[in-house]
Amino acid sequence: MNTVFGNDDVTVTPANDKLRQYLSGKFEPKDDTLFTVIPAIYSGKADAQYLRKEAIDGFKMMADEAKKDGVTLKIVSATRNFYSQKAIWEAKWNGTRADWKDVSTKYPAAVDRAKAILRYSSMPGTSRHHWGTDIDINSVEPDYFLTKKGKAEYDWLVKNASRFGFCQPYSPKGADRPNGYEEEKWHWSYMPLSKNFLSQYPTIVSYTDIKGFDGDVAAESLKVIDNYVLGVNVDCK
Ligand SMILES: [Zn+2]
Protein backbone atom coordinates (compact mmCIF):
# COMPACT_ATOMS: atom_id res chain seq x y z
CA MET A 1 0.00 0.00 0.00
CA ASN A 2 1.27 3.44 -0.87
CA THR A 3 0.74 5.88 1.93
CA VAL A 4 -0.88 9.09 0.81
CA PHE A 5 -1.04 11.29 3.89
CA GLY A 6 -4.29 13.13 4.22
CA ASN A 7 -6.05 10.92 1.70
CA ASP A 8 -9.32 9.69 3.16
CA ASP A 9 -9.28 6.67 0.85
CA VAL A 10 -6.28 5.11 2.59
CA THR A 11 -6.99 2.69 5.39
CA VAL A 12 -4.16 3.01 7.86
CA THR A 13 -3.12 0.10 10.02
CA PRO A 14 -1.09 0.29 13.23
CA ALA A 15 1.69 -1.37 11.25
CA ASN A 16 2.03 1.68 9.07
CA ASP A 17 5.42 2.77 10.24
CA LYS A 18 5.79 5.69 7.86
CA LEU A 19 2.63 7.34 9.16
CA ARG A 20 3.75 6.72 12.74
CA GLN A 21 7.02 8.54 12.08
CA TYR A 22 5.19 11.34 10.28
CA LEU A 23 2.63 11.94 13.04
CA SER A 24 5.36 11.93 15.69
CA GLY A 25 7.50 14.33 13.68
CA LYS A 26 10.38 12.03 12.85
CA PHE A 27 11.08 13.24 9.33
CA GLU A 28 12.62 16.21 7.53
CA PRO A 29 10.01 18.51 5.96
CA LYS A 30 12.56 20.06 3.63
CA ASP A 31 13.26 16.63 2.07
CA ASP A 32 9.59 15.68 1.77
CA THR A 33 7.84 16.34 -1.54
CA LEU A 34 4.48 16.84 0.21
CA PHE A 35 5.91 19.99 1.81
CA THR A 36 6.73 23.36 0.31
CA VAL A 37 8.50 26.54 1.41
CA ILE A 38 6.16 29.29 2.57
CA PRO A 39 6.51 32.25 0.17
CA ALA A 40 8.28 35.21 1.80
CA ILE A 41 5.22 37.49 1.59
CA TYR A 42 3.26 35.10 3.83
CA SER A 43 6.12 34.46 6.27
CA GLY A 44 6.92 36.43 9.40
CA LYS A 45 10.32 34.78 9.74
CA ALA A 46 13.64 35.24 7.96
CA ASP A 47 14.42 31.50 7.87
CA ALA A 48 12.73 29.16 5.41
CA GLN A 49 9.55 27.63 6.82
CA TYR A 50 7.76 24.58 5.45
CA LEU A 51 4.13 23.54 5.30
CA ARG A 52 2.01 20.94 3.55
CA LYS A 53 1.14 22.25 0.10
CA GLU A 54 -2.62 22.04 0.72
CA ALA A 55 -2.27 24.06 3.93
CA ILE A 56 -0.24 26.84 2.31
CA ASP A 57 -2.78 27.03 -0.53
CA GLY A 58 -5.53 27.48 2.06
CA PHE A 59 -3.50 30.05 3.96
CA LYS A 60 -2.75 32.08 0.81
CA MET A 61 -6.46 32.36 0.02
CA MET A 62 -7.21 33.35 3.60
CA ALA A 63 -4.39 35.92 3.87
CA ASP A 64 -5.29 37.49 0.51
CA GLU A 65 -8.91 37.85 1.61
CA ALA A 66 -7.84 39.30 4.98
CA LYS A 67 -5.68 41.85 3.17
CA LYS A 68 -8.77 43.20 1.43
CA ASP A 69 -10.19 43.92 4.90
CA GLY A 70 -6.95 45.64 5.96
CA VAL A 71 -5.74 42.69 8.06
CA THR A 72 -2.22 41.30 7.53
CA LEU A 73 -1.66 37.63 8.40
CA LYS A 74 1.86 36.22 8.51
CA ILE A 75 3.07 32.79 9.58
CA VAL A 76 5.57 33.10 12.44
CA SER A 77 5.93 29.34 13.01
CA ALA A 78 5.01 26.41 10.77
CA THR A 79 6.33 22.86 10.63
CA ARG A 80 8.59 21.84 13.50
CA ASN A 81 9.75 18.24 13.53
CA PHE A 82 10.53 16.11 16.59
CA TYR A 83 14.10 17.39 16.72
CA SER A 84 13.27 21.10 16.60
CA GLN A 85 10.52 20.56 19.19
CA LYS A 86 13.09 18.71 21.34
CA ALA A 87 15.37 21.78 21.19
CA ILE A 88 12.52 24.05 22.33
CA TRP A 89 11.39 21.64 25.07
CA GLU A 90 14.88 20.98 26.45
CA ALA A 91 15.78 24.69 26.50
CA LYS A 92 12.85 25.17 28.87
CA TRP A 93 13.42 21.91 30.76
CA ASN A 94 17.09 22.66 31.48
CA GLY A 95 16.62 26.39 32.03
CA THR A 96 18.95 27.42 29.22
CA ARG A 97 16.30 29.86 28.04
CA ALA A 98 16.46 33.12 29.99
CA ASP A 99 12.80 33.04 31.04
CA TRP A 100 13.12 29.43 32.29
CA LYS A 101 16.39 29.66 34.21
CA ASP A 102 14.79 28.99 37.61
CA VAL A 103 12.76 26.03 36.39
CA SER A 104 14.79 23.27 38.08
CA THR A 105 14.60 24.89 41.52
CA LYS A 106 10.95 25.90 41.11
CA TYR A 107 9.89 22.47 39.82
CA PRO A 108 12.36 19.81 40.94
CA ALA A 109 9.92 16.95 40.22
CA ALA A 110 9.69 15.85 36.57
CA VAL A 111 5.89 15.78 36.43
CA ASP A 112 5.56 19.29 37.89
CA ARG A 113 8.19 20.70 35.55
CA ALA A 114 6.59 19.05 32.52
CA LYS A 115 3.16 20.42 33.52
CA ALA A 116 4.57 23.96 33.69
CA ILE A 117 6.14 23.68 30.22
CA LEU A 118 3.00 22.04 28.85
CA ARG A 119 0.98 25.18 29.46
CA TYR A 120 2.16 26.40 26.05
CA SER A 121 4.73 23.93 24.64
CA SER A 122 4.33 20.37 23.41
CA MET A 123 6.48 17.40 24.20
CA PRO A 124 8.45 16.24 21.14
CA GLY A 125 6.35 13.66 19.29
CA THR A 126 3.03 15.22 20.33
CA SER A 127 3.00 18.60 18.56
CA ARG A 128 0.48 19.40 15.85
CA HIS A 129 3.29 21.45 14.31
CA HIS A 130 4.84 18.11 13.27
CA TRP A 131 2.05 17.57 10.77
CA GLY A 132 2.65 20.55 8.48
CA THR A 133 -0.98 21.56 8.95
CA ASP A 134 -0.68 23.93 11.88
CA ILE A 135 0.62 27.46 12.02
CA ASP A 136 1.19 30.30 14.45
CA ILE A 137 -0.06 33.60 13.06
CA ASN A 138 1.49 37.04 13.73
CA SER A 139 2.69 36.50 17.35
CA VAL A 140 2.94 33.82 20.02
CA GLU A 141 2.49 36.26 22.92
CA PRO A 142 -0.94 36.21 24.61
CA ASP A 143 -0.64 39.96 25.33
CA TYR A 144 -0.23 40.80 21.65
CA PHE A 145 -3.82 39.72 21.05
CA LEU A 146 -5.01 42.21 23.68
CA THR A 147 -3.63 45.11 21.61
CA LYS A 148 -5.94 46.89 19.16
CA LYS A 149 -4.08 45.43 16.18
CA GLY A 150 -3.82 41.91 17.59
CA LYS A 151 -7.47 41.89 18.62
CA ALA A 152 -8.61 43.01 15.15
CA GLU A 153 -6.55 40.21 13.56
CA TYR A 154 -7.91 37.60 15.93
CA ASP A 155 -11.50 38.81 15.49
CA TRP A 156 -11.07 38.54 11.71
CA LEU A 157 -9.80 34.95 12.06
CA VAL A 158 -12.65 33.94 14.37
CA LYS A 159 -15.15 35.31 11.86
CA ASN A 160 -13.52 34.05 8.66
CA ALA A 161 -10.91 31.30 9.15
CA SER A 162 -13.38 28.40 8.94
CA ARG A 163 -14.29 29.44 5.38
CA PHE A 164 -10.71 28.58 4.41
CA GLY A 165 -10.54 25.34 6.40
CA PHE A 166 -8.79 26.71 9.49
CA CYS A 167 -9.77 26.05 13.11
CA GLN A 168 -8.33 27.21 16.46
CA PRO A 169 -7.52 23.96 18.35
CA TYR A 170 -6.52 25.63 21.61
CA SER A 171 -9.70 27.53 22.36
CA PRO A 172 -10.37 28.84 25.90
CA LYS A 173 -10.24 26.16 28.60
CA GLY A 174 -13.61 25.29 30.10
CA ALA A 175 -16.36 22.69 30.10
CA ASP A 176 -15.87 22.06 26.36
CA ARG A 177 -12.09 21.78 26.68
CA PRO A 178 -11.12 20.81 30.24
CA ASN A 179 -7.63 19.49 29.42
CA GLY A 180 -4.57 20.51 27.46
CA TYR A 181 -2.69 23.66 26.62
CA GLU A 182 -3.77 27.14 27.58
CA GLU A 183 -5.67 29.16 25.01
CA GLU A 184 -3.57 30.06 21.95
CA LYS A 185 -5.16 32.74 19.79
CA TRP A 186 -2.26 32.47 17.36
CA HIS A 187 -2.41 28.75 16.60
CA TRP A 188 -4.59 27.69 13.65
CA SER A 189 -4.93 24.32 11.98
CA TYR A 190 -5.77 23.37 8.41
CA MET A 191 -8.63 20.97 9.08
CA PRO A 192 -8.99 19.16 5.75
CA LEU A 193 -5.72 17.41 6.61
CA SER A 194 -5.35 17.71 10.37
CA LYS A 195 -8.77 16.30 11.25
CA ASN A 196 -7.69 13.03 9.67
CA PHE A 197 -4.29 13.06 11.39
CA LEU A 198 -5.84 13.68 14.80
CA SER A 199 -8.25 10.78 14.42
CA GLN A 200 -5.40 8.47 13.41
CA TYR A 201 -2.91 9.65 16.02
CA PRO A 202 -4.11 7.62 19.07
CA THR A 203 -4.11 4.34 17.17
CA ILE A 204 -0.82 4.94 15.35
CA VAL A 205 1.37 6.70 17.92
CA SER A 206 2.15 5.26 21.34
CA TYR A 207 4.23 6.29 24.36
CA THR A 208 7.22 4.42 22.94
CA ASP A 209 7.29 7.16 20.26
CA ILE A 210 7.27 9.94 22.89
CA LYS A 211 10.76 9.24 24.20
CA GLY A 212 14.30 10.45 23.63
CA PHE A 213 14.28 13.86 25.31
CA ASP A 214 14.86 15.26 28.79
CA GLY A 215 11.70 14.84 30.88
CA ASP A 216 10.17 12.13 28.66
CA VAL A 217 9.55 10.14 31.85
CA ALA A 218 6.54 12.40 32.53
CA ALA A 219 4.77 11.69 29.21
CA GLU A 220 2.83 8.62 30.25
CA SER A 221 2.00 9.70 33.79
CA LEU A 222 0.53 12.95 32.45
CA LYS A 223 -1.32 10.99 29.73
CA VAL A 224 -0.16 13.54 27.16
CA ILE A 225 -1.94 11.76 24.29
CA ASP A 226 -5.36 11.87 25.97
CA ASN A 227 -4.96 15.17 27.76
CA TYR A 228 -2.94 17.25 25.31
CA VAL A 229 -3.02 15.77 21.78
CA LEU A 230 -6.74 15.05 22.09
CA GLY A 231 -7.45 18.02 24.39
CA VAL A 232 -8.54 20.32 21.57
CA ASN A 233 -11.51 22.46 20.58
CA VAL A 234 -14.39 20.11 19.68
CA ASP A 235 -14.85 22.04 16.42
CA CYS A 236 -11.35 20.89 15.37
CA LYS A 237 -12.04 17.18 15.81
ZN1 LIG B 1 1.50 26.72 17.54
Image: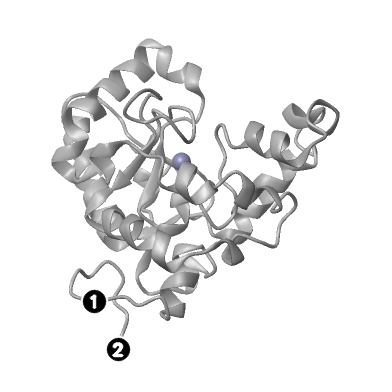
Give left or right: position of 4 versus 37: left
Q: Are marks 2 and 1 in contact (CB under 8 Å)?
A: yes
Crowding near the residue tagged with mark 2, few <14, some 14–19, many ≥20 C-alpha atoms within 10 Å: few
Q: Is residue 123 above or below residue 171?
A: below
**Residue at 52% in and 70% down:** 27
Q: Is residue 176 above or below residue 89?
A: above
Work out which residue is located at the far right of the displayed protein and give it.
105
**Residue at 46% in and 71% down:** 20
Q: Give the quadrant of residue 207.
A: bottom right
Q: Which mark is residue 10?
A: 1
**Residue at 44% in and 51% down:** 128
The amino acid on which the numbered mark 2 sits, given as a three-letter code, is Met
Marks 2 and 1, how far apart at CA: 8 Å
* Frontmost residue, 83 versus 120: 120
Q: Earlier in the sequence, mark 2 or mark 1?
A: 2
Q: Is residue 43 above or below residue 124?
A: above
Give left or right: position of 181 versus 96: left
* Frontmost residue, 58 versus 159: 159
Residue 55 at what x, y percent from top left?
Answer: 28, 54
Location of the N terminus by quadrant is bottom left
Secondary structure beneath label 2:
loop
Residue 195 at what x, y percent from top left?
Answer: 27, 53
Colour scheme: one colour
For label 1, being within 8 Å of ligand 1 is answered no
The amino acid on which the numbered mark 1 sits, given as a three-letter code, is Val
Q: Which mark is residue 162?
A: none
Residue 215 at what x, y percent from top left?
Answer: 73, 49
**Residue at 41% in and 75% down:** 14
Secondary structure beneath label 1:
loop
Q: Which residue is mark 2?
A: 1
